[in-house]
Amino acid sequence: MNLKYVALPIVVLIGFFVVGLPSGVYANEGPGNASIVKIDNSTMLWPVWHKIVKIKKELNEVVKSGNLKTVHEFAFAIRDLSKELLKRTTDKDLSEKQMSNVKNAVQRIAEVATALDEYGDARDQANTVKELKRFNSLIDFIETQYSESGK
């Protein structure tokens, strides 16, 4: 069988699908449709929190393995993400007291991240583990502030 007789109908069908898809998908969009809700990922808390949890797990694995030369990468990533989480947090997310607690914890995370960097660079396993415990407890504390907010 000739290839052009097989390929041509397939290409035409794909073309109909691609051309027809946008009109069906976006048929309800427009200024008069209040049911359309656009979510701006730059204001949502969960994507940032998900990254913090993932990197925290990786950091713990790195320290456990003894590969301390990369500890700073994980610690500083969490430091930056915790600052981003705080930036995205509004009074609708936390009470005034909880917001104050989170701000203090984020400042302490930055300090502990620096200590983790120093001990990791020095390949000081004992002090890295000690600082990691502090780091983890600060992250856990932040989690409790959000989970207890009830907002």
Image (spheres, rainbow, N blue to C red):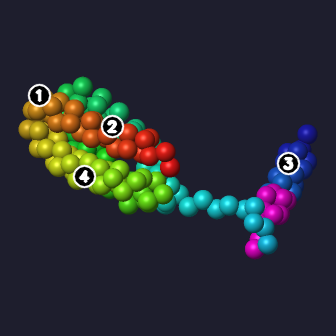
Seen as rendered, the residue at the extreme top is 65
The one nearer the camera, 102 or 74, is 102
Say which residue label 4 marks: 104
Give the amino acid type for the residue marked by disc 4 in the picture: Asn
Give the amino acid type for the residue marked by disc 1 in the picture: Ala
Q: Is residue 126 visible?
A: yes
Measured as percent of width and height from the top left, residue 104 is found at 25, 52
Q: Determine whether, in the image, residue 56 is placed left or right of residue 23.
A: left
Q: Determine whether, in the image, residue 11 is placed left or right of residue 97.
A: right
Residue shown at 27% from the left, 36% from the top = 136
When the figure is inspected, residue 56 is found, relative to residue 41, above or below; the finding is above
User: Which label's residue is closer to the chain start, 1 or 2?
Assistant: 1
Mark sitting on residue 140: 2
Query: Circle 4: is it few (<14), some (14-19), or many (20+) Cα within 10 Å?
Result: few
Label 1, label 2: how many angstroms apart (C-alpha)? 21 Å
Q: Count of labels shown?
A: 4
Say which residue label 1 marks: 126
- Determine whether the residue tagged by mark 4 lies in a helix, strand or loop: helix
